[in-house]
Image (cartoon, rainbow, N blue to C red):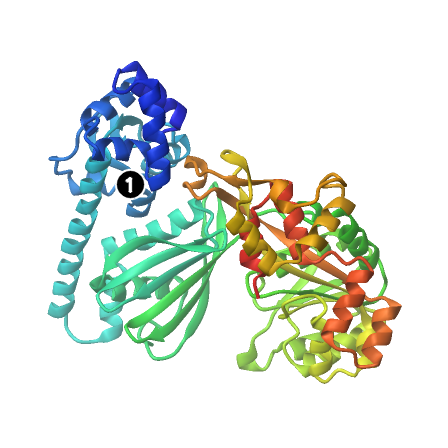
Amino acid sequence: MLKTEQLKEVIIKNKILSAEAFEKEAKEAKAKNIPLEKNLIAKDIVSADILYNAISNYFKVPFTDLKDQIIRNDILMLIPEPIAQVHKIVAFSRDDKGVKIATLDPEDIQTVEFIKKKIGQEIRVYLTTPESIDKTLKQYHKSLKTEFQEITKREEETAPGEQKKLKELAEDLPIIRIVDTLLEYAIFERASDIHIEPTEKEVVARYRIDGVLRPVMTLPKSALAGIVARIKVLANLKIDEHRLPQDGRFKISSQDYRVSFRVSIIPVFDGEKIVLRLLDEKSQILTLEKLGFQSKPLEIIKRNIRKPHGIILVTGPTGSGKTTTLYSILNILNTSEVNISAIEDPIEYRMSGINQSQINPKIGYTFATGLRAFLRQDPNIIMVGEVRDHETAEIAIHAAMTGHLVFSTLHTNDAVTALPRLIDMGVPTFLVVSTTNIIIAQRLVRKICTDCISSYKLDKKSLAELEKQLNTKSLLETLKQENIILPTEKSFGNLLFYRGKGCKQCNNEGYRGRIGIYEVLEISDKIIELLKSKATTEELRKIALTEGMLTMAEDGVIKAKTGITTIEEVLRVTRE
């Protein structure tokens, strides 16, 4: 995408508009929420060919018009469809000197380098028009449709014998190419999950990137059987089982990455749905500072993890980064003087120096049985993937009482709720209060893209939304105490906040990467007294706040005020 300043230079230099007229058109395009160049073409101020020829001269790259060009299938498929769709970039010609590619953004060096590496040939970049790109993208669907019609025809002609038929289907080149593309591009886009979902007439592939699902590919329904069979072959699952859920995993390694894929397949009305979780085995364990803990909560955590025994719980919904937090803490404690054992479901990251064990409920190896076995292995520190039931909770608490430091996760909305939750599981109150050291609650928010960050003030609508969901008076006081704002500030309306405008680095999302927002509850004498007297969750929360606990919302607003995330993100993830 062209920056406004670049487009202004092109338009004024080529005498398409005066500076005054340009500003007027820019305001109008912003109000309509459409790209300026699209608005200029729609209003017949300039033709697409003239405008993009002028832009190509500005970038010193050749211009090509692909509107009436039919591209050979083998050349078109050099760039996988998801990359072509998202980055608006296509291959259109090939000769001895290399491959010619057409794009709307000649400055998208990252994507060009990725394609160059994938193809293994020199790349020559051309600029083209949006209409050319859109017409070329339609050719992908035509060629895929033709290929899958061929596969379906062959399926009908082959002799019966489902397993043999599916195995052959899984080895078809178009199927292999599509699955490889989906996996490889998910790694390139830093996706955490791939969803492949059948509908009545087609198959939709979506990626979860920075916690949000985005469509990347739509395929003919005839492709489903082959894709499912291919992924089942990779994950070593039963190809001919379509009625029961199946779980498996496989790895992909290259010079640049080593990624483990966790596969879950379930039967749905229109076929079988696949979800693949990506686990980067080369990723580094982060420090607690990099995870986003503020200084005071960080101090509480560091003080409590040095205690010789007790239980430390991390709470939050699925996908909120609980395991990453636990691994980061274990990494601090991982020395040759201690024996650390972890029982997990599944083992997400391999950590040297830690005895990691994977549960297997099918053979009776549960968190509870694994935990019992661990206690006979002379551990100093134990990590239990999740406290799911009374039995696991009771063994974990007893382990904490008998001189072990225990780490685990729990599904609750905030830190305070974790205490009544353990009691509800049937663990006696006196055991909960005497063994629990701290509880960390967390969510993940998207970080503002640093390449397109801009400041703004909240409008009346945003202020009303903020006041409806959060106690703004209390938040202002917190920001003053943390020295984030001046003591004289009296309203959120006067404060500067930040957001991303959207650029090529973040796929015009305005966000890139994620960070945690946290609340850390230290079990004090007052909280112990309240728990013993069967106080309500609300009473516990009030005491925790008076004792200085920073809530997740407060932590989020601090991060929003310091330009790490946006107010909208904080409201999105803390909304109950």
**Image spot of residue 528 (x, y percent):** 85, 73
| Residue at 87% from the left image edge and 69% from the top image edge | 526
Task: Describe the element under mark 1 as helix, strand or loop.
Answer: loop
Residue occupying the far right of the picture: 525
- Does residue 380 appear in this view? no
Give the left or right position of residue 409, taking residue 121 as reference: right
**Quarter of the image where one finds residue 562:** top right
Give the left or right position of residue 362, taking residue 558 as reference: left
Q: Is residue 66 above or below residue 479?
A: above
| Residue at 44% from the left image edge and 39% from the top image edge | 502
**Image spot of residue 174 (x, y percent):** 23, 53
**Image spot of residue 210 (x, y percent):** 50, 51
**Image spot of residue 366 (x, y percent):** 61, 78
**Quarter of the image where one finds residue 30:** top left
Amino acid type assigned to the residue bearing label 1 in the image: Ile
Q: Is residue 34 above or below residue 154?
A: above
| Residue at 74% from the left image edge and 75% from the top image edge | 396
Give the left or right position of residue 473, taking residue 526 as reference: left
| Residue at 22% from the left image edge and 32% from the top image edge | 41
Residue at which label 1 appears: 79
Quarter of the image containing the C terminus?
bottom right
In front here: 254 or 227? 227
Mark 1 neighbour density, 10 Å: few (under 14) some (14–19) many (20 or more): many
**Quarter of the image where one finds residue 100:** top left
